[in-house]
Amino acid sequence: MSNMHRIGWFDQQVRAGFYPNSSLLAKQFEISKRQAARDIEYMEMSLRAPLKYVAKYRGYCYEDEAFVLPHLYLSEEEQKILKYLALRYRHYNYDNAESVRRVGDLLSRFEASENLEEKGFSKLPIFDASPRAIQHMELLSEAITDKKSVYALYKDEEGERQLHVSPIRFVSRYHADYVAVHSEAEVRPILLRLDGITHLSIAGAAFGIEDRESFSKFEQGSKPARAPYLAKIRLSTPLDGNSWRGFAIQSRNELIYTVAFYDTDSFLQHLLVTEWEELIAPKWLKQNLQIKCEQITNRFRGTE
């Protein structure tokens, strides 16, 4: 069962004044207390639920009763509307047809089949949102905004290779997502599939900036809407701007920063190569980082 079902149940128990805790959540869904504690931590850190532990009742309440969980599900009627709009927009061929059809392509990500009129509305929509692809879109968006270049490990039918490119904008074609880039090895801009990028890091200043405005055939994309994970980190020196080397800063309190990320592996790699003082939360990220460090240490021991 999805953790969102558990979180929805926990939210109902809090609102009913039952003061639920990790033990009650674990018993209700037959999961470990450790998993239940992670669900509660996810509510606090990622969903920003104003949970408060009340020792007297050994459970949680909301400090702000106006809080509501994000709207994560679509009703059956809303699903039908989205499917209908996707079909109509994708067959639109009048004014601003290209832009309108792009809206249709976006809406069609929520449907399970292209031939809606033949197969009807019985099948639930499927939307495959890879955390890694979302994280890469965030980093590329930062690079485009800040006029930075990136190092990308890219894999396609020609094999895997390291690229140094300057991203221009996002493009959607034939049900796949791309980023248009200037490459050191190419005169003209090229398209890279987002799902072909296996690793990404922000480098120095962008190149080819003077030619960016001439490539109007590429349509500017948008940042993903999926809710990110949040990490609370203490740094040794203050940061300028709204990102920490490409990772968006949600809030700051002196040298303590709340940083958003989508792909855990990418963020762990970032923590291994970047200077910081203390990883305060969440606990599961601290545990993953500890495991990663132990794996690296064991490799050194194996070479002795």
Image (tube, rainbow, N blue to C red):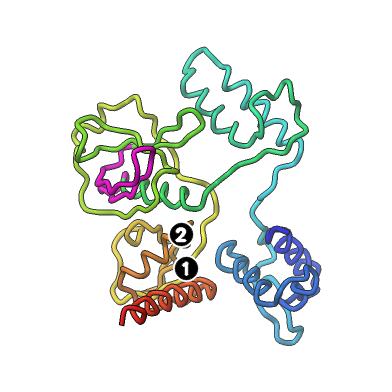
Is the stretch drawn in magenta largely helix, strand or loop?
A: strand
Question: Counting other residues with Cα less than 10 Å from the Cα at mark 1, is it few (<14), some (14-19), or many (20 or more)?
Answer: many
- Amino acid at pointer 2: Phe
Q: Position of residue 69 (x, y in %)?
A: 66, 58
Q: What residue sits 18% from the left and 34% below the top?
A: 210
Quarter of the rendering containing residue 125: top right
Quarter in which the C terminus is drawn: bottom left
Q: Position of residue 110 (x, y in %)?
A: 63, 37
Q: Position of residue 30 (x, y in %)?
A: 78, 71
Which sits in the foreground, 175 or 259? 175
Tell me the number on the disc at residue 253.
Answer: none
Q: Which residues are magenta?
A: 144-168
Please tell me whether residue 167 belongs to the stretch shown in magenta.
yes
Tell me: 232 left or right of 240: right
Q: Are marks 1 and 2 in contact (CB under 8 Å)?
A: yes
- Amino acid at pointer 1: Ala
Tell me: 257 left or right of 9: left
Q: What residue sits 75% from the left and 73% below the top?
A: 26
Residue 293 sits above or below residue 243 on the image = below
- The mark tally for this picture is 2
Q: Residue furthest bottom?
A: 56
**Residue at label 2?**
261
Quarter of the rendering containing residue 15: bottom right
Tell me the number on the disc at residue 231.
Answer: 1
Question: Counting other residues with Cα less than 10 Å from the Cα at mark 2, is it few (<14), some (14-19), or many (20 or more)?
Answer: many
Q: Position of residue 127 (x, y in %)?
A: 61, 42
Quarter in which the N terminus is drawn: bottom right
Q: What residue sits 31% from the left and 69% below the top?
A: 274
Residue 24 sits above or below residue 178 on the image = below
Which sits in the foreground, 203 or 21? 203
